[in-house]
Image (cartoon, helix red, strand yellow):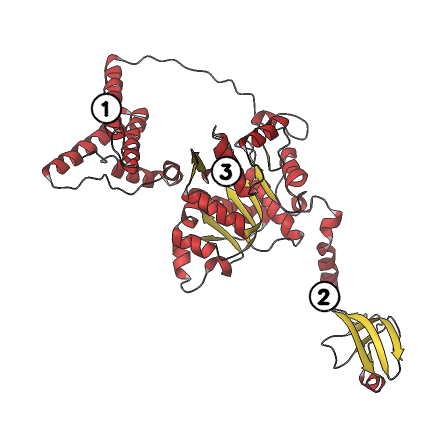
């Protein structure tokens, strides 16, 4: 006779079943229980004649197993529940010495949310990479995330991959154009569970289409302020990076933004930025400003360098004393500065009369490069002016076409690429003209 608490197995089920309740119903036995491995609920009627085909599993303790395997099973079980007993588990299993404000941000703000949508906007030097690593490690130890995507400026990819491996023993694949093309016929986003990629690679139309079809448990975006949108009147202009942010917001369960400059002075821009974290959370700019005044914004935390202290309460950074150093320009330097400024203003005024907005922006950008060169050195300015003069002369002779249709590039995007590549890009822009 089957008793409550017995474990039985037979051809009716794929695995043994633990009996919770039995009841006789004429020629049938009503059993209620669950499978011991998959915990599948069982509620079934069996004929009494079928009981002879069932076998009762003995649950006597067996000490004949390999002690090493037994130890590993016990250790695996212990680690499985470790986060319930160690509130700083990721800290204790990683090769880091976190500071109190890093622990506060991760365990006091981010991980307290059941659905993580958060912006860490501390000043530079606060160790946002360490905080991101702790978030990743802790959520993985708690078995809450498996698929993780990290999006950041291109020049930071190797740094992040190295630090996550060295400090948190987490291996990430850097997904760029080469690795993407190498997996032809597959979706690399779906194939790999831990990926680092560049924000300017992921924002491309054909890449964004493949990215939008997969789901991520956790997405972390460094320098997230670059995903910007602007409102002009009743029209909202979204950059390609912002459109990437919308895709990530839609396809990610947990989403964390990192930046040291979240607010660009434009309230509407900041509200649209927060919209990526929690769409519609702040309906108006006034609601955002009120939350900032009351210091009760649930979507982000920001600490200045003056707020960052060690465990003894000592400041991490020394006090800053900005000093404006005055200097005098020589007569030749004044003449050069005035002439370059006059040239930039004249050309900009001519460009502003153009009805093509892209053309105006292109020329303004080219003129701004001259100012950058002048701030760098007179030699750099001389080289730029000579290149511009040579190309303009070739255009007048018909040997070369005007560069007014050079592809539009985001200035922030230009700042993210390597210095050698940036100078090459800027050299192309130097020849943009109204001709």
Residue marked by disc 3? 272
Q: Which secondary structure, mark 3? A: helix
> Is residue 387 or residue 11 the one in the foreground?
11
Q: Position of residue 385 (x, y in %)?
A: 21, 29
**For the view shown, which residue lies furthest in the left direction?**
397
Give the number of the disc on residue 409.
Answer: none
Residue 95 in the figure: left or right of residue 206? right
Contact (CB < 8 A) between labels 1 and 3?
no
User: From mark 3 to mark 2, how far is it between C-alphas?
Assistant: 54 Å
> Is residue 403 or residue 178 the one in the foreground?
403
Contact (CB < 8 A) between labels 3 and 2?
no
Q: Residue at x 71, y 59 (%)?
A: 76
> Is residue 100 or residue 275 the one in the foreground?
275
Above-or-below relation of 23 to 387 = below
Q: Residue at x 51, y 58 (%)?
A: 192
Give the number of the disc on residue 346.
Answer: 1
User: From mark 1 to mark 3, how far is it between C-alphas?
Assistant: 36 Å
Q: Which secondary structure, mark 1? A: helix
Total count of labels: 3
Please report whichever mark, 1 or 2, sits nearer to the chain's N-terminal start.
2
Residue marked by disc 2? 69
Residue 405 in the figure: left or right of residue 204? left
Q: Position of residue 39 (x, y in %)?
A: 74, 67
Q: Which secondary structure, mark 2? A: helix
Please report whichever mark, 1 or 3, sits nearer to the chain's N-terminal start.
3
**Which callout, 1 or 2, points to the residue nearer the camera?**
1
**Which callout, 1 or 3, points to the residue nearer the camera?**
3
Q: Residue at x 77, y 80 (%)?
A: 10
């Amino acid at each position: 006779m089957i008793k409550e608490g017995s474990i039985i197995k037979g051809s009716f089920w794929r695995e043994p079943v633990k009996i919770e309740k039995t009841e006789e119903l004429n020629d049938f036995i009503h059993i209620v229980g669950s499978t011991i491995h998959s915990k599948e609920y069982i509620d079934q009627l069996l004929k009494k004649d079928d009981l002879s085909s069932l076998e009762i599993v003995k649950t006597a303790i067996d000490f004949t197993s390999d002690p090493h395997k037994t130890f590993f099973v016990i250790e695996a079980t212990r680690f499985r529940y470790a986060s319930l007993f160690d509130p700083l588990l990721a800290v204790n299993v990683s090769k880091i010495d976190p500071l109190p404000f890093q622990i506060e941000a991760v365990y006091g703000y981010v991980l307290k949310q059941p659905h993580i949508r958060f912006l860490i906007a501390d000043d530079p030097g606060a160790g946002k990479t360490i905080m991101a690593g702790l978030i990743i490690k802790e959520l993985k130890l708690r078995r809450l995330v498996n698929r993780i995507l990290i999006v950041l400026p291109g020049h930071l990819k190797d740094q992040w991959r190295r630090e996550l491996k060295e400090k948190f023993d987490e291996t990430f694949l850097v997904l760029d154009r080469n690795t993407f093309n190498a997996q032809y016929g597959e979706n690399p986003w779906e194939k790999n569970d831990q990926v680092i990629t560049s924000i300017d690679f992921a924002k491309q139309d054909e890449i964004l289409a493949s990215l939008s079809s997969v789901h991520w448990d956790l997405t972390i975006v460094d320098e997230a302020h670059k995903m910007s949108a602007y409102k002009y009147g009743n029209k909202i202009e979204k950059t390609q990076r912002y459109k990437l942010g919308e895709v990530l917001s839609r396809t990610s369960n947990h989403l964390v933004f990192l930046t040291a400059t979240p607010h660009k002075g434009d309230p509407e821009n900041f509200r649209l930025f927060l919209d990526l974290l929690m769409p519609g959370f702040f309906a108006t700019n006034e609601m955002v400003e009120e939350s900032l005044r009351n210091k009760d914004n649930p979507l982000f935390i920001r600490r200045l360098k003056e707020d960052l202290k060690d465990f003894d309460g000592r400041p991490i950074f020394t006090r800053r004393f900005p000093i404006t150093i005055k200097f005098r320009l020589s007569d030749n330097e004044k003449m050069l500065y005035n002439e370059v400024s006059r040239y930039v203003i004249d050309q900009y005024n001519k460009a502003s009369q153009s009805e093509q907005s892209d053309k105006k922006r292109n020329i303004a950008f080219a003129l701004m490069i001259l100012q950058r060169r002048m701030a760098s050195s007179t030699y750099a300015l001389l080289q730029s002016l000579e290149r511009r003069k040579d190309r303009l002369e070739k255009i007048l002779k018909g040997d070369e076409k005007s560069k007014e249709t050079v592809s539009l590039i985001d200035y922030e995007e230009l700042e993210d690429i390597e210095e050698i590549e940036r100078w090459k890009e800027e050299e192309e822009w130097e020849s943009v003209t109204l001709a």
